Image (tube, coloured by chain):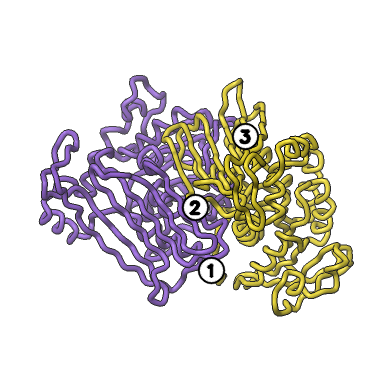
Chain colours: A purple, B yellow
């Protein structure tokens, strides 16, 4: 039996997720909601750029009646405070939910009160709320955690994600500052709304799983400056301008660095990869050559998580609380 | 609160597991059972070669009274028919169980009736039975399955494990034929009790998770012959003798190879590694350099699985049915 999905938020990522869901034998897309007046009333296929209609009309989420469904795939914002009313709405409809909201990936620190309230609401209604994605959600948390399955001892862990920003969507390239002058970059950093959202959530998810409590977290965020001009279609990043961003998060226990998350997102980078090194017994060094592709991987894991969420206990859960997420050909 | 463990079977691997469990802050070893009259009545520390007593006397498993415990860590045999009475005994004591019995890793095919009976007994008693280990249990099944979390489409998967047999225990080297003449190797193969136990179970675990039903499985098993003499302490494998084993399992659907498990266990092999290649969207190519070390990894995953089993539903489960297994520093 196919899993019936409602798609909440049909922006850039929401479109990719809906596009993928429509192609899957194990899913049946039954609804789509968005607040954008330019999308409401239009066919989902038209909104996401298909040549044929999907037979689903996009409605406003506040409309009282939603179609019968199993799970909501949600993609509206990175910010938990913006997303929280969406979550309450989905819970009120009695539906399970997979969201790609980055701040929801590990909300139990910093947003403790809000997370506790959402968890209680979800339990009362008997539904599961989960956030996932490629990062946070996989490359720098779930994946490295899963590699400790064989560990007798983990002394420290380093997770490195090196990503070629030139292969990503324009909003992503803007997010990492591709093409800016260094002064512009520094000014954006000063606003606090720059760089990758989710590194802290990934670190907390790992620390919580591995029992590294009572820690201190330090972060650095620096521009990577182009030594040579870099062609990034349809522009060129001139020499001396910003080619991307380098973020490092170090989590210490009693002064000792036990976890390092090292994220490089630069146009034209050599050797893009995801990499985990575990110092311990046994030592582990794993490299995903080419890296986990951001957009396809996020669409994939969001849809794949639907089946896991349906099998999970109620509540506001994290990836380590649900059965292992994996792809399936579709027959269930 | 520490997880209280009883160790069932104190052979080579059982000793390693008990040794590791005694060192963990999150576990409390409360019992040890073995049928060997040379071990019954002796202190566990003495049996596993510690310099100090563990304060636990090894008893015979048939003794009516077992200590109060949370989970049994079991290590007696690779064969399900030998292990089945052990499992029934543990279930009757009302205890959860983690076993390293290879044939138990995916018993729902070939041993269908026995697996169904054990599953029913476990459910009736409200306990969980799980088999794990590095292989089967991780390197060639759980790990590659977990890498499909981000997949939109998996066309085919190849899992390669290349292992340096010279770094392993003598019984392991004997299992893969190190030092035999080719005729001796072929004679052993003809007995059917040679090579790695668990490749079929790994293939079935993957096929079941990914929905590759109605498949055909082919296997080959060949000697790897030494081109040059290989020093394997305390012996030398002469040129022309067997340095190890190469096993390939191919799983086909409608004639198409969708899964290849390729296992090389050879003394003195170059570039030992675990490797997963997924042809699909996105493509994935991951290499664990050096490979997941067999004995430490099996001890690690067995102990780490204890916490997951305590959180899991009752029944005879596989690794994809329990919460993700991972290491933890110990405070719970």
Q: Is residue B330 above or below residue A15?
A: below
Kindly identify which residue carries mark 3. B248
Spatial CA span between label 2 and label 1: 19 Å
Please tell me in which quadrant of the rendered image residue A98 appears.
Answer: top left
SS of the residue under disc 3:
strand
Mark 3 burial class by Cα count in 10 Å: few <14, some 14-19, many 20+: some
User: Where residue B189 sits in the image (x, y, percent)?
Assistant: 75, 37
What residue appears at the point 50 percent right and 29 percent down from the top-left corner?
A: B155
Pointers 1 and 3 in contact (C-beta within 8 Å): no
Mark 2 burial class by Cα count in 10 Å: few <14, some 14-19, many 20+: many
Spatial CA span between label 1 and label 3: 37 Å
The answer to whether residue A323 is visible is yes
Kindly identify which residue carries mark 2. A319
What subunit carries mark 2? A
What subunit carries mark 1? B
SS of the residue under disc 2:
loop
Spatial CA span between label 3 and label 2: 33 Å
Q: Nearer the viewer, mark 2 or mark 1?
A: 1
What residue appears at the point 19 percent right and 34 percent down from the top-left corner?
A: A233
Please tell me in which quadrant of the rendered image residue A173 appears.
Answer: top left
Specify the quadrant that holds the C terminus of chain A. top right
What residue appears at the point 24 percent right and 60 percent down from the top-left corner?
A: A221
Nearer-N-terminus badge (1/3): 3
Kindly identify which residue carries mark 1. B329
Q: Residue A277 vs residue B180: left or right?
A: left
Foreground of the two, A80 or A148: A148
User: Where residue B294 sits in the image (x, y, percent)?
Assistant: 61, 54
**How many discs appear?**
3
């Amino acid at each position: 039996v196919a899993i019936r999905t409602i798609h909440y938020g049909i922006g850039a990522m929401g479109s990719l997720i809906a596009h993928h869901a429509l192609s899957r034998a194990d899913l049946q897309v039954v609804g789509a909601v968005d607040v954008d007046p330019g999308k409401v009333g239009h066919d989902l296929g038209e909104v996401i750029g298909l040549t044929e209609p999907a037979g689903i009309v996009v409605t406003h989420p506040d409309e009282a009646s939603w179609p019968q469904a199993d799970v909501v795939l949600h993609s509206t914002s990175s910010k938990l405070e913006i997303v929280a009313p969406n979550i309450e709405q989905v819970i009120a409809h009695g539906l399970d939910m997979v969201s790609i909201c980055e701040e929801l990936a590990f909300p139990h620190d910093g947003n403790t009160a809000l997370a506790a309230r959402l968890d209680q609401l979800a339990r009362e209604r008997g539904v599961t709320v989960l956030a996932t994605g490629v990062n946070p959600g996989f490359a720098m948390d779930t994946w490295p955690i899963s590699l400790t399955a064989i560990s007798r001892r983990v002394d420290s862990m380093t997770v490195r994600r090196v990503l070629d920003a030139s292969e990503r969507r324009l909003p992503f390239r803007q997010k990492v500052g591709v093409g800016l002058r260094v002064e512009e970059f520094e000014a954006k950093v000063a606003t606090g709304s720059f760089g990758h959202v989710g590194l802290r959530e990934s670190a907390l998810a790992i620390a919580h799983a591995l029992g590294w409590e009572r820690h201190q977290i330090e972060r650095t965020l620096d521009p990577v400056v182009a030594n040579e001009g870099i062609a990034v279609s349809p522009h060129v990043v001139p020499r001396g301008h910003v080619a991307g961003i380098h973020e490092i998060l170090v989590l210490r226990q009693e002064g000792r660095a036990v976890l390092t998350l090292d994220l490089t997102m630069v146009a034209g980078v050599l050797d893009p990869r995801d990499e985990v090194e575990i110092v311990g017994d046994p030592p582990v060094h794993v490299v995903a050559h080419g890296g986990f592709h951001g957009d396809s991987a996020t669409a994939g894991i969001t849809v794949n998580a639907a089946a896991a969420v349906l099998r999970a206990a109620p509540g506001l859960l994290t990836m380590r609380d649900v059965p292992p997420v994996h792809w399936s050909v579709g027959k269930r």
